[in-house]
Image (cartoon, grey):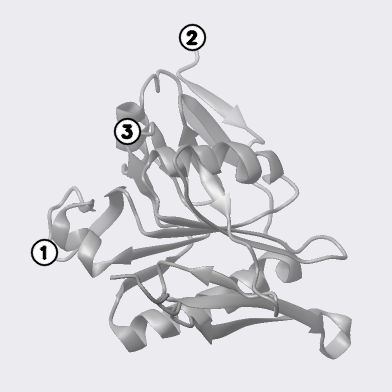
Amino acid sequence: MANSLLIEDRLEIPLGLNSLADFRAWALSDDFPEEGRIDYIRGRIEVDMSPEDLFCHGTPKSEIHYVVYGRVKRRNMGHVFLDCTRISSPLAELSAEPDLVFVSHRAIKTGRVRLVPKATEEEGRFVEIEGAVDWIAEIISDSSEAKDKERLPAAYFAAGVREFWLIDARKRQLFFQIYHRGKAGFIAVRPDDDGSQRSKVFGCSYRLDRKKGQHGFWSYELREKPSVPRRRQKGNS
């Protein structure tokens, strides 16, 4: 009897992964594959072995990381992670590797998130983030569209994620949307007159632009704009 499932002749998934705990144990073991993205979403294992599109996925992700990381570093807000950073939430039955993740110092200090150490328990060595992270961004690819638009946002909301960004750069019109938490799900932020959207997590507004650069390839720019405080109306205390 087979004890694993072979996918695309490259990836073996052990049989008997019947819970989030089983999946997390496998994901943190030496047997976990080094290639591909493998997520556990509410009892379902989702595998994406597709190569990353250079100018519709890789470059916008790099630009967003560059700008957001710069702000976080300047303001000493916390930690930004790029690729292969596993987040888990028992509450949401979720274990995933988002494109981009931000965890604030406050989230760690208050215990809203917990850094999971390596099995060797070496000081300062961690392999997973458990709990409600502050921010996640996903860039849609051809193989992940339904997951990025439907299943992951619902799971991230259930996990307590404070803010979610979704980007789709595959088509003629660039899609960039910031979502804040609502009562029952994420709510799209309404753009300002110049197209900027306010980020509560980072305390400013953002607009993602692109243009054709050298050799006709897309070039991206994430524009950061300070948020203007709302004026207090007369008569308010």
Q: Position of residue 52 (x, y in %)?
A: 67, 60
The structure residue drawn at horizontal position 52% and vertical position 47%, both measured from the top left corner, is 186
Q: Nearer the viewer, mark 2 or mark 1?
A: 1
Q: Position of residue 38 (x, y in %)?
A: 51, 41
Q: Residues within 10 Å of mark 2 (few under 14, many from 20)?
A: few
Tell me which label, 3 or 2, sits earlier in the chain. Answer: 2
**Is 165 situated above or below 32?**
below
Quadrant in the picture for residue 8: top right
Which of the two residues, 118 or 59, is positioned nearer the viewer here? 59
State the residue position of label 3: 91
For residue 123, the mark is: 1
Q: Nearer the viewer, mark 3 or mark 2?
A: 3
Residue type at tag 3: Leu
- What kind of element bears circle 2? loop
Tell me which label, 2 or 1, sits earlier in the chain. Answer: 2
Q: Is residue 78 left or right of residue 123?
A: right
Residue type at tag 1: Glu
Q: Position of residue 69 (x, y in %)?
A: 43, 79
State the residue position of label 2: 1
